[in-house]
Image (cartoon, rainbow, N blue to C red):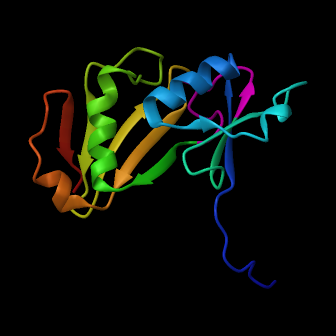
Amino acid sequence: MQGLGEISVDHVELFVPDRREAAGWYEKALGLKVVRGLEDWAVDGGPLMVSGDGGATKLALFEGEARGSRETADHQRVAFRVDGASFLRFLEGLEKAPVYDDKGHEMASVRVVDFDKAYSAFFCDPWGNRYEVTTYDHEEVANQPKPSRWMVERYW
C-alpha cells in the first residue's frame, strides 16, 4: 500500500447535548468559531463544525449522549498545539470560560504538566470530552510566574 502523502487531521467527532450551547463554550474557552459555509450540515442530525484555524482542523459537534465519565466512550483526548503566548492566554482566560473534570464539575485549578520540552494543560468540556492544550515553547512558559489556579507537576 502506498502512503497518502502529506496528511493532517480534518476533524474530530464528539457528542454534546446541544450543539449551539457547546459551540458557545468552545468559542469562550478555546476561541473556536463555527465554520461559515458548513453550518447547513447542522440539520437532521448532522454536525456543527467549529475551528480555530479557519476550518483546516475542526471539531464536529453532534447532538447526543456526551462521553461523561465512561472510560471507553468516544475518543480518549484531543490535543491542541499552540505557541507559548497562546498557552498563557488560555490559562489566563479560565476565569471567563471555566473548564471541567470528566464528571462535569467545574475545576478550581487546572492540571498543567511540565514535560521538560513542552507544557500541557489537561481539562474537559462541560460534557466530559477530554482535551489538552500543549505548547513546545517551554522556556517562554517556564519563565512566567505560575498563578495559583495552575497545578504544575513534572511528568518524569
- Res 67 → quadrant: top right
- Res 59 → quadrant: top right
- How far across and down, in percent of the image, does residue 114 sit? 22, 52
Residue at point 66% right, 50% down? Answer: 55
Q: Is residue 111 above or below residue 118?
A: above
Q: Is residue 68 visible?
A: no
- How far across and down, in percent of the image, does residue 149 sit? 20, 27
Q: Is residue 133 above or below residue 41?
A: below
- How far across and down, in percent of the image, does residue 74 sit? 66, 37
Q: Is residue 18 above or below residue 15?
A: above
Residue at point 54% right, 38% down? Answer: 32
Secondary structure mostly taken by the magenta-highlighted segment of the chain: loop
The residue most toward the front is: 36
**Image quarter of the N terminus:** bottom right
The residue most toward the bottom is: 2
**Image quarter of the C terminus:** bottom left
Q: How many marks?
A: 0
17 sits to left or right of 139: right
Residue range corresponding to the magenta coloring:
61-75
Residue at point 62% right, 52% down? Answer: 57
Q: Is residue 96 visible?
A: yes
- How far across and down, in percent of the image, does residue 16 sit? 66, 23
110 sits to left or right of 125: left
Q: Is residue 69 magenta?
A: yes
Q: Is residue 44 magenta?
A: no
